[in-house]
Image (cartoon, helix red, strand yellow):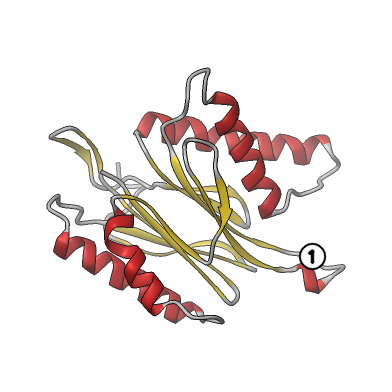
Amino acid sequence: MDSVFGVCYNGGVILAADQSNARSILVYQENLDKIAELTSHSAMGVAGPNCDLVNFTEYVAKNIRLYELSNDGTKLSVHAQANFARGELAYALRRGPYQVNILLGGYDTNEADKSKEGASLYHLDYMGTLHKVPFGAQGYASYFTLSIMDREYKENLNEAEAITIVEHCIAEIQTRFMLKQPNYIIKAVDKDGVRVIKYGSDPSDN
């Protein structure tokens, strides 16, 4: 039932996800936050069962933090974080797979070499495949939004233009999708870190 999508722009990444927690014909909550913060400058939007969503995102985030503590504060790049997540998905595939499909976005900071700074977005599925993409969608969102992104995406988007694309995608899903997904959360990841742009229902209000 999940809808997760993201757009990479010149200076950051916009991630968006529906806030519904549902199984079969039941809706458990409509204020779930499916965009998990991995580090101060990276986050992953996850489509899949809530149990796997929580378990996998916490596992990846804590292992990234453990790596930093074990290596004198050395931070993993967004590319390295995506490859770590991909490795864990592949390892679990025949042992007890995580039923998660992921968009992982982040911003690499590098004070020593500014040319290595920038935003990136990665598409991962539960089979362990990984691709760097300018935009992407997971879950039912892909049926409705990829054509919109393909038409409206252009090089060197600014943040406002990326948010507009995401809002067009949300409007399309809410118009065309037979199931109700009234609330969406939108987050940005840029040089200043991860921040919430807007949400339909406050995730902290449980």
Q: Residue at x 55, y 24 (%)?
A: 92
* Above or below, comparing residue 8 to residue 91 in the picture: below
**Which residue is label 1 attached to?**
110
Give SS at disc 1.
Answer: loop
Q: Residue at x 46, y 29 (%)?
A: 98
* Above or below, comparing residue 118 to residue 92 in the picture: below
* Lateral position of residue 141 relative to residue 173, left or right: right
Q: Nearer the viewer, residue 148 or 163?
A: 148
* Lateral position of residue 206 relative to residue 87, left or right: left
Residue 61 placed where, x, y %?
60, 39
Which image quadrant is residue 105 in? bottom right
Q: Is residue 15 visible?
A: no
What's the amino acid at mark 1?
Asn
Packing grade of label 1 (10 A; few <14, some 14-19, many >=20) is few
Residue 161 placed where, x, y %?
43, 81
In this view, the residue farthest toward the top is 95
* Above or below, comparing residue 124 to residue 8 in the picture: above
